[in-house]
Amino acid sequence: MTAAQIDGLDLVALQRFFEGSGVAVDGELRAELISGGKSNLTFKVSDDVSRWVLRRPPTAGLTPSAHDVAREFRVCAALQDSPVPVAPTVVLCEDPSVMGAPFAVTGFVDGRVIRTVDDIDLLSDAEIGSCTGELVRVLAALHDVDYRAVGLESFGRPDGYLSRQVALWARQWERVKTRDLPDLERLHGMLEASIPGESQAAIVHGDYRIDNTLVAADDPGRVVAVVDWELSTLGDPLADLAQMCVYRHPALDDILGEPAAWTSTRLPSADAIAHMYSAATGTPLDHWGFYLGLANFKLAVIAEGITHRHLAGATTGDGFAHACEAVPPLVAAGLAAMEEHR
C-alpha cells in the first residue's frame, strides 16, 4: 500500500530517514496498518528483504502522558538482554518535522496475537493454562529486572508513584470526560484517602494483558515479545498486576470494540491470576482493594478518552464510539473492590 493511502505515514519521508540513519533499505517501502486509533498507530513496513514495525502517536486528540513512542523505544532497548522478550529496536525519530510526529521502529517479530474470544477458543484448556502461567511468569520477570542495571534509573520516579497516579488519572478525566459521573468522583476521593504509605519499585508495563504480547505460533505457552509499552515507567509492581487483573472485566469488550480474548470465561479469574503472581514472586497482596480501585479508575478514564478522541475525529478504524459505556461498570467495580477490602 502506498503512502498516499495511509493516514499518518509518509513512506517517502520514512525511506529518506532510514537511508540517513544507516538502516539498509532494499527496494521500495510498503506498509499496512496493523492497528490504530485507541493508542499508538502501528504499521508493518517492509521492503524486498526486511520487515519492521513502526509506531507513532494518533493524528489528533492526544493526552500529555500517553502515546509516548520514545518511552516505548527506550524501555525495549534496555530490556534487549533481559529475561523479558521484546522486539529488537532499530531506530527512534523524535523530530516531528520528519513525518509530522515522533516515531519508533523495531524489527518485526513473527508470532501469534491472541486478541479476540475466537482466538482464545482455538486453544485447548491445557494451552490456556500454559499461556496464562507464561503471562504471569513474564510479568514477574519484568518486575524482577534491576532497572538501574539496565540504565533505566531515570525512566520514572518510583517514590510517590501511587499518589501521582491517582492525581494523573483524575487530571486525565477532566481533559477527556464527555459527561459528569458522581460515582467516579467518589472513587477518586476514596483512592486519595487510602493511598498506601509505602510501595515497591520496578519497571511496570502499565497495559499488560494477553493481546499486548506475541506468543509463538506453535506454542501459546511461550511469549516471544511483549509489546505496547507506551504506559511503561518505574512504579509499583502491584499496580501493574492489578491492571492485568482488572482487564479481565467484561467491560474491556466495549473498550476494544470486540469480544476480547482476555475477558473469556475460560481463563482463570482475576483473583486466581493475582494469587498465581503472589505465589510465584512471594509478594503479599497488601492493600489489594486500593490497587484494584486504582486500576478500575485508570481503565475507566482510558475508556472515556477513546470516545473523546473518536468524537474529535482522531481515531482510525471502528469500534470507538461505545468505549465510554465501559466507564460506569468499571467505576462500580472499583468502588466494590475498595469496600470489600477495607
Image (cartoon, rainbow, N blue to C red):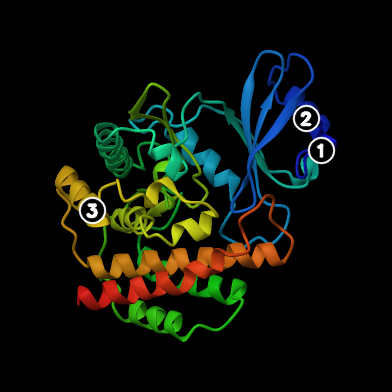
Residue 305 falls in which quadrant of the image? bottom right
Q: Residue at x 80, y 44 (%)?
A: 97
Camera-nearest label, 1 or 3 = 1
Relative to 78, is 176 above or below?
Answer: below
- The amino acid sitting under disc 3 is Ala
Q: Which residue lies under the disc numbered 2? A: 1
**Camera-side residue of 54 and 329:** 329
Density class for disc 1 (Cα within 10 Å; few <14, some 14-19, many ≥20) is: few
Contact between marks 2 and 1 (CB within 8 A): the answer is yes
Query: Tags 1 and 3 in contact by the CB under 8 Å rule?
Result: no
Q: Earlier in the sequence, mark 1 or mark 3?
A: 1
Tag of residue 5? 1
The residue lying at 44 percent from left, 37 percent from top is 119
The amino acid at mark 2 is Met
Distance, label 1 to label 3, CA atoms, is: 44 Å
Report the quarter where the N terminus lies. top right
Helix, strand or loop status at disc 1: helix
Query: Where is the C terminus found, in terms of image quarters?
Result: bottom left
Task: Judge whether residue 160 can be spotted in this image.
Answer: no
- Residue wearing tag 3: 274
